[in-house]
Image (tube, rainbow, N blue to C red):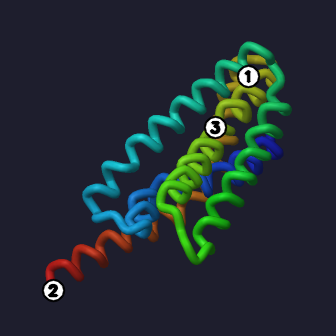
Amino acid sequence: NILFAIILFLRDTPSYSISFYLPTIIHEFGFDPIFSNLLTSPIQAFSALIQWLVAWSCDKNGKHGMHLLLIGSLNILSYGLFLYEIDRPQKSVVLEYVGVALVTAFTSASGAPIISWLTNNLSSTTSVAAGIAFVVSFGNLGTYDIHKNKHKQCATNELNNIK
């Protein structure tokens, strides 16, 4: 259970970070704030589709470790594309947007194989319930500071807008 908790912790922290700051990231591409919020919807829809496909494939094939390895590899490649595009002198907004969409999708998609692999490794329904509660609780510890800083940032932005 501890290994699954650590894996979920390492998955939840970037996943929540991207979800919370996605409008800000898109705003940095040069879009106005309202349009930036609208542009998060296609990314989240694409992410949901990838999550569903991964969950379906994982359930159909039962190869959770291979799915995690493939998703992790694709995630590393998508982070590389995104970081490469940000550092280029002639940036392409389309490639930046595609990069952040891929990062969001592959970061989020690893949740289903982790949880389903955990539940398949536990025997009774009580141990499954306790195992999922422990793993998800530990995984969400990595997001505590993100929540705290996001609320602090929103409050600071509101105070600056009043002045």
Q: For the residues marked 3 and 2, what is the alpha-carbon distance in whole angstroms?
A: 42 Å
Q: For the residues marked 3 and 1, what is the alpha-carbon distance in whole angstroms?
A: 11 Å
Q: Is residue 10 left or right of residue 66?
A: left
- Residue 84 placed where, x, y %? 67, 66
Whether the residues at callouts 3 and 1 have beta carbons within 8 Å, the answer is no
> Toward the viewer: 121 or 33?
33
Q: Which residue corresponds to mark 3?
A: 109
Q: Quadrant of the N terminus?
A: top right
Q: Earlier in the sequence, mark 3 or mark 1?
A: 1
Q: Residue at left 58%, top 77%?
A: 89
Q: Amino acid at mark 3?
A: Ala
Q: Callout 2: few (<14), some (14-19), or many (20+) C-alpha neighbours within 10 Å?
A: few
Q: Amino acid at mark 1?
A: Cys
Toward the left, the furthest residue is: 162
**Can you say whether 51 is above or below 103 in the image?**
above
Residue 140 can be seen in this image: no
Q: Earlier in the sequence, mark 1 or mark 2?
A: 1
Q: Residue at left 64%, top 47%?
A: 107
Q: Residue at left 55%, top 72%?
A: 90
Q: Amino acid at mark 2?
A: Lys
Tag of residue 163? 2
Q: For the residues marked 1 and 2, what is the alpha-carbon distance in whole angstroms?
A: 52 Å
Tag of residue 58? 1
Which element carries disc 3, helix, strand or loop? helix
Residue 116 can be seen in this image: yes
